[in-house]
Amino acid sequence: MKIKRIAHIGVAVADVDEVEKVYTDKLGLGGATRETLDWMNLEVAFVPIGQTNIELVQSTIEDGVMKKYIEKKGEGVHHIALEVDDVAAATEELKARGVRMVHDTPQKGAHGALINFLHPKETHGVFIELCQYPEGDH
């Protein structure tokens, strides 16, 4: 498994519109892009900073996973995403090492990426996402 870079830092937010303004209006960052992930019931905004992004993640339904996360832990850093060459191979490699993964196989994420997560109990509470972008993206 080759880790290429930190792709993004995911931040759990209650109101993506409000929080995006912190990064664009107050910090002067621009170029935010939006995407709705219907299968996950999430609205995301990516704010680029060099080769990395801040990903703002909001639940689109009342009983969504991100809404429940915020109710339990509050808004703030949710995960760190690491870009890899091949998320399926990385998933299998980690599983062979005895690492618990959130999904048995990679799932579709934002920007057409394939993603999977290491279970946070494996990483001492840090939720780590592995992501593989389509050729030529990001």
Image: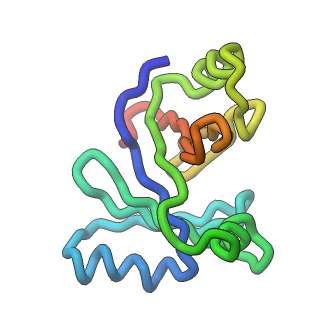
Residue 29: x and y in percent read 23, 69
State the residue at coordinates (41%, 50%).
Answer: 8
Is 126 left or right of 42, judged from the image as shown?
Answer: left
Is 52 left or right of 92, judged from the image as shown?
Answer: left
Outermost residue on the front side: it is 124
Asked which quadrant contains residue 94, the reply is top right
State the residue at coordinates (68%, 76%).
Answer: 71
Is 66 left or right of 85, judged from the image as shown?
Answer: right
* Residue in the foreground of this view, choosing between 65 and 61: 65
State the residue at coordinates (67%, 67%).
Answer: 69
Outermost residue on the left side: it is 28
Asked which quadrant contains residue 129, the reply is top right
- Total of numbered circles in the picture? 0
Residue 44: x and y in percent read 53, 65
Question: From the viewer's perspective, is residue 105 above or below residue 69?
Answer: above
Is 86 left or right of 31, judged from the image as shown?
Answer: right
State the residue at coordinates (43%, 31%).
Answer: 135
Asked which quadrant contains residue 14, the reply is bottom right
Residue 127: x and y in percent read 57, 47
Question: From the viewer's perspective, is residue 67 above or below residue 84?
Answer: below
